[in-house]
Structure formats: structure tokens, C-alpha cells
Image (cartoon, rainbow, N blue to C red):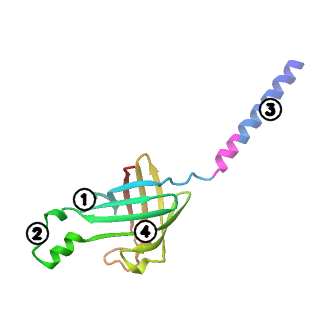
Amino acid sequence: MTKRLLAATMMLGLSGTLLVSNRDTLSSAPSACKVQGVWERVATISGGKRTDFTTARQAKIVTKNRFMWLQAANHRDTIPLTATVDSLRYSAMAGGYGTYDVSGHRYTEHINLFVNPKTEGQSFTASCRVEGKQWFHTYRASDIDATMPGRNPNDSTTEIWRRVD
């Protein structure tokens, strides 16, 4: 009788432990998208088609609560500086910075300074997923600018960034 009581007590205790740990696992919030670091843009997926990003170099630096994005056209060193437009292309860079926050798999940038001044003071939200050294940053065209010519506002774009540090 004592052995049966002891066995029953152990089974109940084990079952309760399994139930509690399973409940904690199921109810816990998804882990935040870990984006701190230095990133280089490597590709874009738009309309279901992946395109390697080769027209320019982009970097995104993400600290504890701030981000900075920079872009420069490739092959600027081969542009002949014979006209004003050549000099403009040679020295052209783009970028922006601000603060950001992450909630689960939602990444929101709060723009302080940007290449398009109309976006300053606004927030931009995208879904965020990090797998190994790749960051998948997905948004709809309407999230950036509802008036983008030639784009359906519901088209989604995924920027793929590679962690470099």
C-alpha cells in the first residue's frame, strides 16, 4: 500500500510539473527580434522575386536604442568628373537616423533625420525576423509612402541584411 501511495504521489507531482512547464512555454511572449549590430544589405524580395542588392552599398548600424542607415552608389570611383551631374553622382550618399524599438517581431523606427524630409518625425513599422546572421525586414509599400508611383500600396518588400559585426 505504501509503495502504491508513493508511486501515485510521484506520478501526480511529475504530471503537475509537466503541466506547469508546458503552460509557461505556451504562454510566454515571443522573443524580441535581436537587431543590435552592424548590418549590410544583401538582397531584396519584392513581388515574390529575390534580387541581390548590387546597385549600391547600404549599411545599418543598430545600437541599444538608436539606428543609422547609410547608402552610397557602387562604382562612384569610375564616374568621369566632366559635368556637374557627374560630380553630384560621385558625391551622392543617402541616409537617416533615429531611435527604434522592438516588440516581439515588430521593429519600429522613429525617424529624426532622413533623406526624404517628409518622413522626419514619423514612425515606420516592419516585421522583423533574425535567422543566424540574416535579418529579414518586411514592410508594405504603403508603410513608407502611399503615393509611390508604380507600386500597389499592399505590395510587400523584404530587405535582407547580413550581420557584419
Label 2 is placed on what type of residue? Pro
Mark 1 or 3: in front is 1
Q: Sequence-wise, which precedes: disc 3 or disc 2? A: 3
Q: Nearer the viewer, mark 3 or mark 2?
A: 2
Q: Amino acid at mark 3?
A: Leu
Q: Nearer the viewer, residue 71 or 87?
A: 87
Percent x, y for residue 136? Answer: 42, 56
Foreground label between 2 and 1: 2
Where is residue 79, by image quadrant?
Answer: bottom left
Q: Nearer the viewer, residue 140 or 67?
A: 67
Q: Can see residue 39?
A: yes
Query: Up-down: is 77 above or below 121?
Result: above
Residue under pointer 2: 80
Separation of marks 2 and 4 at Cα, in angstroms = 31 Å
Q: Residue at x 43, y 62 (%)?
A: 138
Q: Earlier in the sequence, mark 3 or mark 4?
A: 3
Q: Secondary structure at mark 3?
A: helix
Identity of the residue drawn at 12% across and 77% down: 83
- Name above or below for residue 125 compared with residue 20: below
Q: Could you tell me which secondary element the residue under label 4 belongs to?
A: strand
Q: Earlier in the sequence, mark 1 or mark 4?
A: 1
Q: Earlier in the sequence, mark 2 or mark 4?
A: 2
Magenta residue span:
21-28
* Marker disc for residue 54: 1
